[in-house]
Image (cartoon, helix red, strand yellow):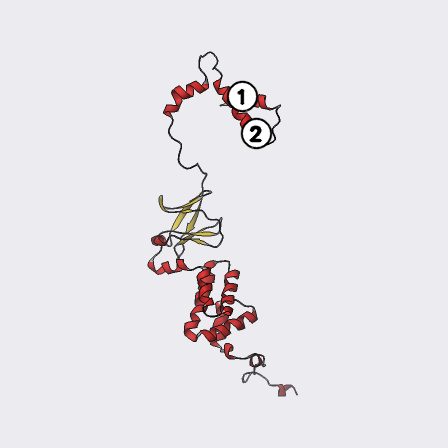
Amino acid sequence: MEGAVKIIYSRIYAKLRTGEYFTLEELNKAILVALEEHNLTLLRGRNYSRRQQFEEVERQTLAPLPPLRYELKKQLFATVMKNGHVSMSVDKHYYSVPYRFIGKKVKLMYSRNTVEVFYHYERIAVHPRTKSPYNYTTEKDHLASAHRFVSDWTPERFLSWATGIHEDVNLYILKILDRKQHPEQAYKSCVGILSFAKKVGNERLIKACQRALGYGIYNYKTIQTILERGMDKLDETEENKPMEMPLHENIRGEEYYQ
């Protein structure tokens, strides 16, 4: 091997070192020309060249090149989550596996283009690699029937649902989607909030979202609290009234301090 390096150095590098090349393409072309000259030169003490030996003897014994370029792979381990996905921690992306492996510890083998998931040396899933943090790559056949409707959750679906109620509800849902890093958390909040329309009616939900937008707080719990306390029914004057102090034997009134 060292001998081959020495030969290439003297036959190619030595010829090119004094030349001027202004692009990598120009240099590569010059290297190919010098390499072909080297391959056509007769071997010392023999009446044939490297090129002749290759064409007459070696070429016919070569196997075809693999259809895919070789890629280095790395590995990591993860536990399959309850939603049937594993976390690829280096990209913060989630990939589905068959639901029967929920709770199992699996090995992820990943390259620049693919992610493979193995359980006890059996490959159970393969996906194109996606470097999109906090998003999911899901194959529907992997999911149990109870989980398949979740795979259809998308920001567009929730925004369309919210728009059908009112533009302020749409704005509130948009704020939640923008602020939640983990999409599953955001989607659960969206489902919970939009489901209030059936429980309390569109008008109450619209007013609750308008009030919450005024507070600048964006989560399911805020809407739930507003509706449970009937705050959506209060006008601004009533809301700004000071709260009356509840009667309690341990609470001293203002008369005590006079």
Q: Is residue 221 above or below residue 183?
A: below
Identify residue for label 2: 26
Q: Please tell me in which quadrant of the rendered image residue 29 appears.
A: top right
Q: Please tell me in which quadrant of the rendered image residue 151 appears.
A: bottom left
Name the foreground residue: 247 vs 9.
Answer: 9
Name the foreground residue: 248 vs 209.
Answer: 209
- Position of residue 80 measured from the top left corner of the image (x, y, whole percent): 40, 53
Q: Is residue 116 above or below residue 245?
A: above
At label 1, the amino acid type is: Lys
Q: Is residue 120 visible?
A: no
At label 2, the amino acid type is: Glu
Neighbour tally class for label 1: few under 14, some 14-19, many 20 plus, Cα within 10 Å? few
Q: Is residue 87 above or below residue 251?
A: above
- Position of residue 164 measured from the top left corner of the image (x, y, whole percent): 45, 68
Identify residue for label 1: 6
- Position of residue 233 measured from the top left corner of the image (x, y, whole percent): 50, 79
In the image, taking residue 236 as reference, residue 148 lies left or right, namely left
Instruction: Tell me the distance, in whole angstroms, between the alpha carbons under discs 2 and 1.
Output: 23 Å
Q: Please tell me in which quadrant of the rendered image residue 102 appears.
A: bottom left
Name the foreground residue: 236 vs 106.
Answer: 236
The quarter of the rendered structure image containing the C terminus is: bottom right
In the image, taking residue 197 as reference, residue 22 lies left or right, namely right
